[in-house]
Amino acid sequence: MNSEFNFIELTELARSDKYVQYELFFGPNFPGMHGNFGYILDVAGSTIVKVRPNPGLLHRGFEKLMEQKLWIQNLSLIPRICVPDPDPNEVAYCTAMEKMMGLEIPERAKFIRTITLEMSRLTSLLMGMGALGAMMGLYTVMYRMMEDRDRILDHFEWLTGARIYHIFNLPGGVRRDLPEGWSASLLKLLKELEANIPEWDHLFFENPVVHKRLKGIGPLVTREAINMGITGPSLRATGYKADVRLEDPYAAYPYLEVKVPTTTGGDALARAVQVRQEYEAALGLIRKALDIIPGGDIKADIGNPLKLIVPAGDAYARVESSKGEFGYYLVSDGGLKPYRVAVRGPSLPAALSLCHKHLPGMLIDDVAIWMASLAICPPDFDK
């Protein structure tokens, strides 16, 4: 009896017997859930029949909250829209402001932004790969990858004073210059992180358990991914080369040789392999940026930030986060606060739309794996 027939049979049983089908809240109380987001699942046996997304209401209304705060105050709020990879929010928001202000940031600030963006990418990819391993019971993978992530966060703390919410990028540049000894220490860490990649391959990517669990989970083809609004590693895992760093370069990326790997297959296994390739590529980009970073100023003069006025107009700025395209659309009426804010997050298409296609017919065991493979970030929905 094949799995499709099992699913059909269970569905028919559920229609005739109210005790066969039950409701399961796959939410924050479930160890496989990523954050406060949740799914209300109608389940027959162990097979999902229907899914209803539940945003969670923890990070709610950020877009409207931003319209009530000064331009500069929002920098302490927006990193929470994607906690594992917060820096793209800062850069996208500041870039949109700079477009409306006609403000060009110093060259050194562009490089520092790029370095911190790629460091944030590393921390997010390590957390994502580790979480995917944990969803399959491979906790050694998670513990080891989180250890390396903490070492990157040590350098964030050294540079910004914070480990998670850095609030480091400002309209016109960055908050402070690189501390003495910081670059040398980071280069040493990059070598050590690169030396650990064979260990990740042995523990995770060459593990037969991983291949058996991930193969065929949540398959996507390029056209479907594009139509659904899927971007980032999940789109590139279908073989399609698309990256904001190439298509709409920002910060110091025009000065760097950005190589964007792709993978074919489009399923959870392909997405995992894609992330592993992007992790290695990010290490190389940071090294290149540190090698050619120029001297000079780190920020333009914008006067008193608490009295900052952005000229009337609108602008959209986007960046390539670890999860895909992160974009900020800002509208100014010439006042001290944004008139309108809209955030384009990369997680929403999969978690709120694609779930209705992929999850019905899937086993409960694979829901967390599916979410981790698509790098779903819960605050993205509440915003």
Image: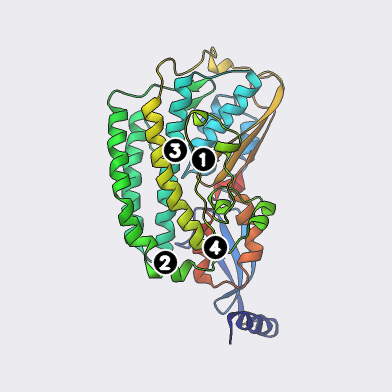
* Disc 4 to disc 3, C-alpha distance: 25 Å
Which comes before the other along the chain, label 1 or label 3? Answer: 1
Residue 332 shows in the view: no
> Can you give x and y, in whole percent of width and height, for residue 381 in the image?
61, 48
Question: Do tag 1 and tag 2 residues touch (Cβ < 8 Å)?
Answer: no
* Disc 1 to disc 4, C-alpha distance: 29 Å
Secondary structure beneath dot 4 equals loop
Q: Amino acid at mark 3?
A: Glu
> Can you give x and y, in whole percent of width and height, for residue 344 in the image?
63, 41
Residue holding disc 3: 118
Which comes before the other along the chain, label 2 or label 4? Answer: 2
* Disc 1 to disc 3, C-alpha distance: 18 Å
Q: Nearer the viewer, mark 1 or mark 4?
A: 4
* Disc 2 to disc 3, C-alpha distance: 27 Å
Secondary structure beneath dot 3 equals helix
- Quarter of the image for residue 97 reads top right
| Dot 1 alpha-carbon crowd within 10 angstroms: few under 14, some 14 to 19, many 20 or more | many
Please give the label number shown on residue 80. 1
Which comes before the other along the chain, label 4 or label 3? Answer: 3
Quarter the C terminus occupies: top right
Q: Nearer the viewer, mark 1 or mark 3?
A: 3
| Dot 3 alpha-carbon crowd within 10 angstroms: few under 14, some 14 to 19, many 20 or more | many
Quarter the N terminus occupies: bottom right
Secondary structure beneath dot 2 equals helix
Q: Amino acid at mark 2?
A: Val
Residue holding disc 4: 267
Q: Is residue 179 left or right of residue 333?
A: left
Residue 203 shows in the view: yes
Residue holding disc 2: 210
